[in-house]
Image (cartoon, coloured by chain):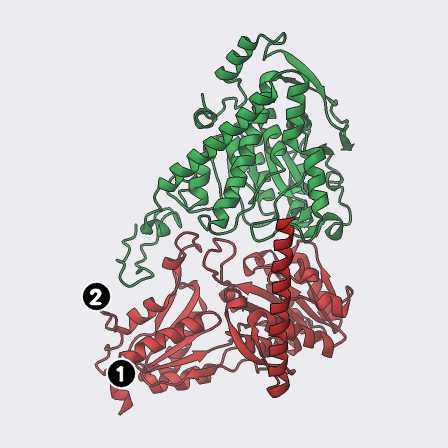
Amino acid sequence: MSLLSRFASSQFGSNILKPTSILSSSQRRRSFSSSSDETLTIETSIPFTSHNCEPPSRTVETTASELMSFFRDMVLMRRMEIAADSLYKAKLIRGFCHLYDGQEAVAVGMESAITRKDCVITAYRDHCTFLCRGGTLIEVFSELMGRRDGCSKGKGGSMHFYRKEGGFYGGHGIVGAQIPLGVGLAFGQKYSKDPNVTFSLYGDGAANQGQLFEALNIAALWDLPAILVCENNHYGMGTAEWRSAKSPAYYKRGDYAPGLKVDGMDVLAVKQACKFAKEHALKNGPLILEMDTYRYHGHSMSDPGSTYRTRDEISGVRQERDPIERVRKLVLAHDISTEKELKDIEKAARKEVDEAIAKAKESQVPDPSDLFTNVYVKGLGVEACGADRKEVKATLP
Amino acid sequence: MSTSMKRLGKWVSLVSKRGLSTSCIQKDVSENGVKSLNLYSAINQALHIALDTDPRAYVFGEDVGFGGVFRCTTGLADRFGKNRVFNTPLCEQGIVGFGIGLAAMGNRAIAEIQFADYIFPAFDQIVNEAAKFRYRSGNQFNCGGLTIRTPYGAVGHGGHYHSQSPEAFFCHVPGIKVVIPRSPKEAKGLLLSCIRDPNPIVFFEPKWLYRLAVEEVPEDDYMTPLSEAEVIRQGCDITLVGWGAQLSIMEQACLDAEKEGISCELIDLKTLIPWDKETVEASVKKTGRLLISHEAPVTGGFGAEISASILERCFSRLEAPVARVCGLDTPFPLVFEPFYMPTKNKKVCKFGCCNEGCNSTWLTAGGTRATSNRS
């Protein structure tokens, strides 16, 4: 079963990280002493640092198949983002485009700790989160290129991915604006007594927005199951965290709300933290998770990403903290797979991405009349003529 | 090795090219005191002059210390120091509120909001604090030194949140001024006027023109008066009114119309509130027809206000209803931008001189063909 179809077929509530048949059979064939479902215990890279709470244990339980799926998912995401970079430079993607490469462990680790009934809401760096929530590559690339088969019917573009059936509430363009929305989602969950939580993701730049503190106060006041996840990639556009924040210890900035600082480059640490956060939030209300992570690309495609940080800094993170390499080492150290198999997975991801792009290119651009749909429930009934007077006037709903 | 050589070669050629062009420009300057500048460089020059001439002027905003995302503040921090030109955290409400306080102490606070689309978190500060400070304190306090610069408008592929034109929201607020320049020369003169004007001002910069528009800009310190519209093209059949990036598009429409024997008068409003009604009124009384264009959605746009005012003043002189060729009533679209925009062809269509079957009768409505005005 290919990854692509796995993503496509994973439905609401199903576990994205179920071992695939290929993997388990290949392992049987290789007759490892440990079965793919046997529990492995692995220590996180560094201990958690906590604020007003008892941190979870450093020892994380996982399985061989889970590690393999982490590797596969992150490799696929990395490849997808690199491909989006090329498509943007070829002007096939217009608008603004923010890439997630480097931060994959946050999305993947979080997804492994929660279910699709939990809600996730994020800002505009949303491609990989969408994929985690069950989106497909074809939907990703179609949306990026403004085609009909995109997850927002080609009307949103890079910054506006949504997947309602996967509990993914987008995809928001204005810095920090999604955080209060997430608190509203959490209220909805608490009100209907769902055993679920909402993860609101934001960056270190957004952490200085007043809305964050307004939302946190509401969440704490009413004990809402809201988890605020600060993806700290250390640069708000071109501004280093210490230039814009008096206290860059974002996990402590909730004051009355507890916080946890997590190595966001370690997928197992992220998983452990999110599991802990979900349990905590259901019992005690909001919590801030600070994911210490790093983006390899610039802020957006118009930022080369090298004027405000050194190339050495970027390559240092790549060499020492890369989330994919960490899992690769774990997989090899535990003798779960071979270097060749991992290379094959990378090759397969490349092929899968290329195929998805080819299919997305075949998708049509939305009909001109779609410009006027979804503004209100029934549209406005406006008449307008095309940009070129040779084009017909659009008949509107 | 070879790649590094190549890179070096490229760099050398770049430098030499730049060296050459600078010397050309400098020669130009020494001759007549003007320099060919694009819009962002003109803004940059105005900011240099503003900080140079007033030691109590400050520039701040997201990333302005590094030159800003559009390079408008390049070199300011180096020249005037980090105490006068500084980065703020990412918090628009805080930036404007801080600017109001700074201005209330008698300083010139020049705030930058990175995109006009991001101005809304600061909307409360602008509308409730800045605009009413003087009024509600009985003139004891004011924030007249506050100027908020922000890039607005379409760029061709900006999508939902890097393309909007929110000027009309601010035109509904007595107590602030709204100014939009159309070209580098105008931008420099108007920005200096705004910074020195004793009222809080929102200054929208057409970001499409930052690099695109190049014009001879005087080197010296000059100010273009606010609330004075400019007739940039004389005509007798139709009056066209617009601002900012729309002007160049309207100008093209005028040229197309001219080929069909229709004579258009084009007015750049420059200041949206308080606006120069007299200039527009005089022109409409002459032509009998008014067409207004803006990128913002047509409903509730500033075009509606102009239309209503002109109807009050020129009712008996109008030959046809006031026409508005504006953005459509949809969110600013990503893939449909060309459909959304008030393009040249949409305006020409309205003149009725397009041969593609649109059959607009606007120009012939009222019985008197516009040409009769000429006699």
Name the spot of residue B167 as percent of width and height, x first: 51, 66
| Chain of the residue where label 2 is placed in the rendered structure | B
Dot 1, how many residues are within 10 Å of its Cα: few (below 14), some (14-19), or many (20+)? many
Tag in front: 1 or 2: 2
| Chain of the residue where label 1 is placed in the rendered structure | B
Residue beneath the point at 66% across and 54% down: B91
Q: Quadrant of residue A54?
A: top right
Secondary structure beneath dot 1 equals helix
Give the distance between the C-alpha atoms of the residues marked 1 and 2, in whole angstroms: 20 Å
Q: Is residue B128 left or right of residue B155?
A: right
- Relative to B42, is A44 above or below? above
Q: Is residue A352 visible?
A: yes
Q: Which residue is mark 2?
A: B357
The hue of chain B in the figure is red
Residue beneath the point at 59% across and 76% down: B188
Using the rendered image, report if marks 1 and 2 lie on a common chain: yes
Check the picture and name the quadrant holding the N terminus of chain A. top left
Nearer the observer, A150 or B124: A150
Extreme residue in the bottom direction: B375
Name the spot of residue B202 as percent of width and height, x first: 59, 69
Task: Indicate the amino acid at tag 1.
Answer: Ala
- Relative to A101, is B140 above or below? below
Q: Earlier in the sequence, mark 1 or mark 2?
A: 2
Task: Indicate the amino acid at tag 2.
Answer: Gly
**Label ID, residue B370:** 1
